[in-house]
Image (cartoon, helix red, strand yellow):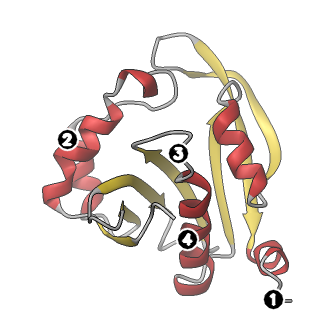
Amino acid sequence: MPVRTIRPATQADIAWIVSQEQRPDFATFIHRWPPERHERNLVDRDKLYLIAQDEAQERVAFVILAGISSKARSFELVRMAVTRPGAGIGKPLLMIVMEMAFNKLGANRLWLDVFDDNVRARRVYEAVGFREEGTSGETAVKTDGQLGSLVIMSILATEYQVLIGCQ
């Protein structure tokens, strides 16, 4: 498995995170945030930034969760970006994030939104148990300025437990 460890992001990771968001191949799927926004989010107790590393301790992905302090324990997977799409990093990483969210952080629900034309990401989310809740219609602004639809997907803690065989 390409992901060896997951650790909390630090201030020193911000430039790398921003560089990943600015990759041309992510342009239609990831909104680019300025470093200052990441810096604010990094110290926000309601958010959790994670860095995934491979066996050589190279960064291979980052994940941003929000809603950590939610009374409903409904966490949002704000962003997940891998350095090598299609290399088998996404699904195992998502399983680790789900285990952390449900078993360590006490989430009741993990949800996300994804552009409807981001087929690769939607397949990964579905493969690990996320279900479609609905769509936003063409109300979301894509990075190229066009309007797009967001698909809302989620998985509940009880669904996750059944998925991994712990009823």
Q: CA distance from mark 3 to mark 4?
A: 16 Å
Q: CA distance from mark 1 to mark 4?
A: 16 Å
Element under label 1? loop
Instruction: Give the total of numbered labels.
Output: 4
Which label number is shown at residue 96? 4
Q: Which numbered disc flags the more N-terminal residue, 2 or 3?
A: 2
| Neighbour tally class for label 1: few under 14, some 14-19, many 20 plus, Cα within 10 Å | few
Q: CA distance from mark 3 to mark 1?
A: 29 Å
Element under label 4? helix
In the picture of the structure, the residue carrying the numbered disc 3 is 87
Q: Are marks 1 and 2 in contact (CB under 8 Å)?
A: no
Q: Is residue 101 above or below residue 53?
A: below
Q: Nearer the viewer, residue 66 or 59?
A: 59
Residue at the (64%, 40%) spot, across then down: 121
Q: Residue furthest bottom?
A: 167
Q: Amino acid at mark 2?
A: Pro
Q: Which numbered disc flags the more N-terminal residue, 1 or 2?
A: 2
Q: Amino acid at mark 1?
A: Cys
Q: Which numbered disc flags the more N-terminal residue, 3 or 1?
A: 3
Q: Amino acid at mark 4?
A: Ile
Q: Are marks 3 and 4 in contact (CB under 8 Å)?
A: no
Q: CA distance from mark 4 to mark 2?
A: 26 Å
Q: Amino acid at mark 3?
A: Ala
In front: label 1 or label 2: 1
In the picture of the structure, the residue carrying the numbered disc 1 is 166
Quadrant that contains the C terminus: bottom right
Residue 4 in the image: x percent, y percent?
41, 71
